[in-house]
Amino acid sequence: MWRSHICGQVVPTPARGHRPAHLHNIIRSAMVALFTEVYTMFETLFSYPTVVRHHCEGPLAAERVEYLGALASRGMAWNTILCRASYCLCVAKELERWPANHCLSEQAIEALASTWAAERVASGRASASDWPERHFRFAATDFLRTLNRLRSLPISSPPRFHDELEGFIAAQQQSRWSSEATCRSARWQITKFLGYLEQRQLGLGELTPSHVDDFFQQMAQRWGRNSLRTSAKMLRAWFTHCEAGDWVRAGLAKAILLPRIYRHEGLPMGPTWKVISRVVTETAGDDPASLRDHAIILLLSVIRAPIGRGSATTARRYRLATRPASADSLQK
């Protein structure tokens, strides 16, 4: 029996009186092959049959499979492709509401991203809306661009110091920075600083070390020590380039101090109380060695917390980490 819908696409039934029977079989075979390809992709991504059917029967299923297959061929992580599949389905449902040649604007993508993020937060799948909104916006824009359904933005004038920045990046690529990732990071860091100057209506010739310090003090509220060090290194190279062109006052690059990164900065201060509780439970025993080890661990679990203002909290955690059976064994 001929199916009128496959993968969300309307399939017109061929009229045998108006076209040869073998053409009918060719069209049917092509649609069956398309359905198999679509179903195989979504069956690989999702484990629940209901979710697989939901994606297969959604609009623009073939286009979504082609887009996800291209991402997989570029080596994108499977979990990322899984998220992209949900993003693309949401975008496809929005496109279904419009004519086939309609293109979505940046404002429409922003509205979709805000709605998506709000639903994720409301369902408890995200604690804040920033991350899902930002990732949805990027994925939706990329998917619409491959479909040629993204409304082009009017060409705007390049930002301030654009030519100077691009000249700096080109010079660094020839001498020091062979990695594209390094150049991209430097462009982002310096653009961030130039935007800071734009907000305060400052020119490069007006800069003083105090202005740079104010920028880092503002960024320190959101960035860690590693991010601040990366930004300082990029800005130091930028100001060295600017000093050579006599765009800024001399000595500005040397005035930037790099924050110190400690070798073991990322190591935790100690085990969590959940880990301590598990170790205390596992070391419980009646033999002398277990009693000795158990007592040492109980003592260290109390010493781990600061004495004084938090002593009451330490005592409560100590009682939670121990069991009555352990206390009885210590009294033997």
Image (cartoon, helix red, strand yellow):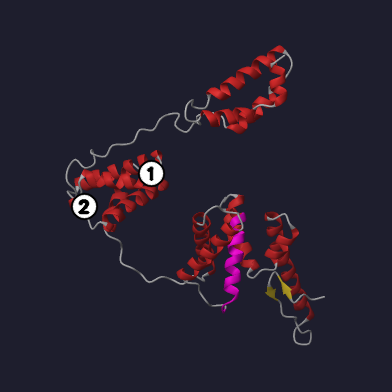
Q: Where 213 falls versus 317 (above or below)? A: below
> How many numbered marks have been drawn onto this rendered protein structure?
2
Q: Quadrant of residue 330?
A: top right
Task: Check contact, mark 2 vs mark 1: CB within 8 A.
Answer: no
The residue to which callout 2 is attached is 204
The kind of secondary structure element at disc 1 is loop
Q: Give the crowd class for mark 2: few <14, some 14-19, many >=20 residues within 10 Å.
A: some
Image position, residue 173 (x, y; %): 34, 46
Quarter the C terminus occupies: top right
298 with respect to 181 (left or right)? right
The residue to which callout 1 is attached is 178
Residue toward you, 8 or 286: 286
- Give the amino acid type for the residue marked by disc 2 in the picture: Leu
**Which residue is located at x 57 percent, y 56 percent?**
71
Q: What segment is highlighted magenta in the picture?
A: 82-99
Of marks 2 and 1, the one in the foreground: 2
**Which residue is located at x 59 percent, y 63 percent?**
88
- Give the amino acid type for the residue marked by disc 1 in the picture: Ser
Image position, residue 279 (x, y; %): 65, 26
